[in-house]
Image (cartoon, rainbow, N blue to C red):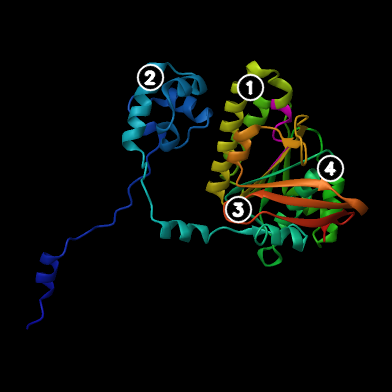
Amino acid sequence: MTEKTASENIEDEEIVIDVDEPELTVEDLPGVGPATAEKLREAGFEELLAIAVMSPSELAEQAELGEAVSAKIIAGAKKMANIGGFVSGSALLDRRKTVQKLTSGSSSLDELLGGGFETQAIVEVFGEFGSGKTQIGHQLAVNTILPLDKGGFDGEIFYIDTEDTFRPERIAQMAEAVGIDPQEALDRIHVARAYNSAHQILLVDEIKRMSKNIEVKLIIVDSLTSHFRAEYIGRGMLAPRQQKLNKHMKELKQLSDINNALVLVTNQVMSKPDAMWGDPTKAIGGHIVAHASTFRLYLRKSKGGRRIARLIDSPNLPDGEAVFTVTTEGLRD
């Protein structure tokens, strides 16, 4: 049996030339001129896939375009966008290998969460006033600055403050305790005060824009529901409130996936007077917030300044409890 010549091999094989195709942008969509492209970009539509999954009425409202024009743009985006399809479980397992874990400073709390607070996830922390929700936010903000070998992310933090609870002095205390220069810590935490729910939603769009130039590894919303709770009052406003909250959390999840970042949201609680047994406290936001959160931690006070964190929802971890304390230096066992 003779070996094939090089020319025969070439004839037998399909020759694939790897040519880097230019990435398509909103300007490449049919019927989109410079003015329309600018409107789309200002509304936060940088990628074709983001446009392809919109409805004409939503795109028309957000980008200030006519519905007929929006429908045409969406149709073009569907044809041109790389919508993708199903992937194998093996591919998803490979993607899970990119997930990073952030230490909380408390080994019992880290153990409860399977090694720490993980990226590509929304962690909801809820509990009564003074249960330690904001303290966890401050501690994770400081720990994100730590190098990877010390349980950190070596990244930047965005903090959306809705209740004026962010305290730079507390950050300085916690930073000194873990050996970080307080000024460096404060320089790497970007804080914005949200004055209403619309502003809160817009700040997420601003994080999307800034994350192109900054390695964002942690996004904190403290608290997620306070503005929505104050603005959408009564049973008649429940549906629009939940729709807005749902969209808000979907955008936060998208940010965490794209940037391989952690999203921490704190949540308020209400009392259930009809509860006959057990703890009558219940998180605000109902099923929308519960389903959109990857992990849910319920915090409550205990004796001697201790806090109890109960993991009540996780896709891969059993329910359990961890005990930790909040000291001057931060979260500790």
The stretch drawn in magenta includes residue 224: yes
Q: Nearer the viewer, mark 4 or mark 3?
A: 3
Counting from the top left corner in percent of width and height, residue 279 is at: 78, 41
Counting from the top left corner in percent of width and height, residue 223 is at: 73, 36
- The extreme bottom residue here reads 1
Residue at the location (73% across, 36% down)? 282
- Name the side, left or right, on which 304 lies relative to 69: right
**Mark 1 residue crowding within 10 angstroms, few (<14) / some (14–19) / many (20+):** some
Which amino acid type is shown beneath numbered disc 1?
Leu
| Lower sequence index among marks 4 and 1 | 4
| Lower sequence index among marks 3 and 1 | 3
Q: Nearer the viewer, mark 2 or mark 3?
A: 3
Q: Which residue is mark 1?
A: 238
Q: Which residue is mark 3?
A: 119
Quarter-of-image position of residue 207: top right
Q: Which residues are magenta?
A: 220-228
Decide if residue 196 is in sight here.
Answer: no
**Mark 4 residue crowding within 10 angstroms, few (<14) / some (14–19) / many (20+):** few
Q: Which residue is mark 2?
A: 69
Quarter-of-image position of residue 333: bottom right
Which amino acid type is shown beneath numbered disc 4?
Arg
**Numbered disc 2: secondary structure:** helix
Where 184 falls versus 168 (above or below)? below
Q: Which residue is mark 4?
A: 167
Which amino acid type is shown beneath numbered disc 3?
Thr
**Numbered disc 1: secondary structure:** helix
Mark 4 touching mark 1, by CB under 8 A? no
Residue at the location (51% across, 23% down)? 62
